[in-house]
Image (spheres, helix red, strand yellow):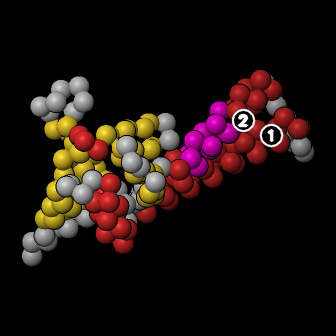
Amino acid sequence: MKKFRYSFPISAYVIYALLMAVSLFSIIFASLRLAEVEKLVSVYPASDIVSIVVFAVFLVLMTLISFGTCYRLNDQAFVSDHVLFKKKIEWDRVLRYVIDEASGVSALYYLDPAVPDNVLFIVICIKASERQSFVDALKSFKPDLLIETNAKHE
């Protein structure tokens, strides 16, 4: 099985880090209010407990999304694993892989399992430095895969 990490834009990582910091601050603040440290007193302890639980779950989910999102290739299928959402595409349904060098976007086209005449696609977000090893891995699991590259226009 081959595994490739999902590559978020830098701005997404910055936003995720800010959200995680706010969540952590909220957890600490609510905990200090529950412990009645200094002048921090919890008027409604139940609301602080609920906020700690909610922000802790949110913090765990943001961490999983940031570091656990990936693409996996195995003998049976291509799997896009976005923590809560998994998309499994059998190799016999995969048609082609298209790379647009101008935008840096690539997509995997496949036949819809519900309606075989429909062609769907999934955008592949990986680092440009890993793209060739991703193509090699695709070719190793599906040798007859059509790979298209749209060159940059200048």
Quadrant where the C terminus sits is bottom left
User: Which residue lies at the image location 72% right of the left edge and 42% below the top edge?
Assistant: 27
Identity of the amino acid at label 1?
Ser
- Tell me where the magenta segment starts and ends, as one range: 54-64
- Quick one: label 2, few (<14), some, or many (20+) residues within 10 Å? many
**Camera-nearest residue between 136 and 109:** 136
Q: Position of residue 51 (x, y in %)?
A: 69, 32
Q: Relative to 92, is 140 above or below? A: below
- Residue at 16% x, 30% y is 116
- Name the spot of residue 111 as percent of width and height, x first: 20, 37
Which residue is drawn at the image coordinates 35% and 46% (left, top)?
A: 78
Q: Quadrant of residue 6?
A: bottom left
**Relative to the observer, which residue lies in front, 9 or 32?**
9
Q: Spot the residue most to the bottom.
A: 154
Separation of residues labelled 2 and 1 (CA atoms): 7 Å
Mark toward the start of the polypeptide (2 vs 1): 1
Q: Classify residue 79 as left or right of residue 64.
A: left
Query: What element does badge 2 sit on?
Result: helix
Q: Residues within 10 Å of mark 1 (few under 14, many from 20)?
A: some
Tell me residue 90's x, y (percent). Answer: 31, 40
The residue identified by callout 1 is 31
Q: Are marks 2 and 1 in contact (CB under 8 Å)?
A: yes
Residue 24 magenta-highlighted: no
In the rendered image, residue 55 lying in the magenta stretch gets the answer yes
Main structural element of the magenta stretch: helix, strand or loop?
helix
In the rendered image, the residue lying farthest to the left is: 154
Whether residue 121 is visible: no
Write down the residue under mark 2. 52
**Image location (x, y in percent) of residue 66:** 52, 52
Residue 44: which quarter of the image?
A: top right
